[in-house]
Amino acid sequence: MTRIDTLLSSFPRAALLSQPTPLERLDRLSEELDIDLWIKRDDLTGLSFGGNKTRQLEFYIGAARAAQADTILITGAVQSNFARTAAAAAAKYGMQAVLQREERVPGMDLLYHSNGNVFLSDILGAEAMSYPEGEDEAGADAALEARAEELRAAGRRPYIIPLGLGHAPLGALGYVQGGAELASQIGGFDAAVVPSGSGATHGGFLTGVRLAGITEPVFGICVRRGAQAQKTRLEQVTAELAGLMDIQRPFASDDILTWDGALAPGYGRAGPGTRGALQRMASAEGILLDPVYSAKTFAGLLGLLEEGAIRKGQKVLLLHTGGLPALFAYQNELGFSGAGS
Ligand SMILES: *Cc1c(COP(=O)(O)O)cnc(C)c1O
């Protein structure tokens, strides 16, 4: 066992993942952009259309099973990939999922509220409740706790996957493992570009690749909040993660890089940059990205290239975190009519 395997082996874990996920070279985009571009296909993690939450859920579902839970509660945006994947993981282990849908993105249409991840979660047998606001992590967590209390009173054994900070970041362990898996596939890179939302993926990945001995920059592309607020969040996530693993954090604060040039017009909204990145990846490589996270992450890579933070000739890794079911809920937001582009 490697040191990372040993560190992770003390946490209960549920097997959900097809791994390792593929690492592929993007030949046409490499040539167009004059870089050596590689993509880590965590859209292909397997369970129910895949994505990054499968890695995170291995540790949450492991903890839930260790606690003999029979119900998983989770909160997120209406089109939450985490909620959909949790519904699938709960089903696989014979548990009921309760999903709280937060109205995080104002003014969205019927497709957004019924198709994509919402539709799949219904098929997966999840129970749904709604939360009227979107920028209230503490309130959303409290509403979930209140539902858990009702379930306890009815004799059930609920397990909550929390949204806010201040809880053991079990999901980030999945990306410590994911970062180490990537390191063993790729050897090294000059720069990596990953999405940064809750920070479990970015914080775990950064920790994993640093523990594996890679010292090159990892850029976190902001999808939820501005660069400074996201960096502050990552400080806390990575400190909590190191505490959870009982290690010294293997990097300094100035190693946490956040970039928010692809965030506009805001969380869950797709502007022209998002649409352009999505179409560029699709038409150059035949690979689909999602509108909320992975297209913005690729837009971030293009922006960093333009700014010179990533330079011509460099070996660059793009982490594809999945999220593809949301495409079907974002047809109108992205402005596709079905008449060809
Ligand atoms: C949740 C999500 C992210 C962001 O991951 P965090 O761990 O929350 O930062 C990125 N991509 C997709 C597709 C997601 O569903």
Image: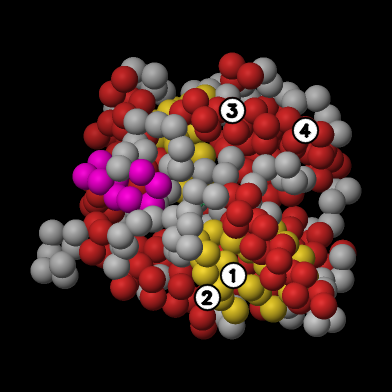
Residue topped by disc 1 = 99
Q: Which residue lies at the image location 48% right of the left edge and 76% below the top edge? A: 120
Task: Indicate the secondary structure of the residue bearing disc 2.
Answer: helix
47 vs 311: above or below: below
Q: Position of residue 28 (x, y in %)?
A: 28, 42
Q: Earlier in the sequence, mark 2 or mark 1?
A: 1
Q: Nearer the viewer, residue 143 or 212?
A: 143
Residue topped by disc 2 = 121
Task: Indicate the secondary structure of the residue bearing disc 1.
Answer: strand
Name the quadrant of the C terminus.
Answer: bottom left
Q: Earlier in the sequence, mark 1 or mark 3?
A: 1
- Kindly identify which numbered label has been placed on residue 242: 4
- The residues bearing labels 4 and 3 have C-alpha atoms spaced at a distance of 16 Å
| Residue type of the residue flagged with mark 3 | Thr
255 vs 166: above or below: above
What's the magenta region?
266-274
Q: Earlier in the sequence, mark 4 or mark 2?
A: 2
- The residues bearing labels 4 and 1 have C-alpha atoms spaced at a distance of 29 Å
Q: Pointer 4 and pointer 3: residues touching (CB < 8 Å)?
A: no
| Residue type of the residue flagged with mark 1 | Leu
Residue topped by disc 3 = 232
- The residues bearing labels 4 and 2 have C-alpha atoms spaced at a distance of 33 Å
Q: Position of residue 29 (x, y in %)?
A: 30, 39
| Residue type of the residue flagged with mark 4 | Ala
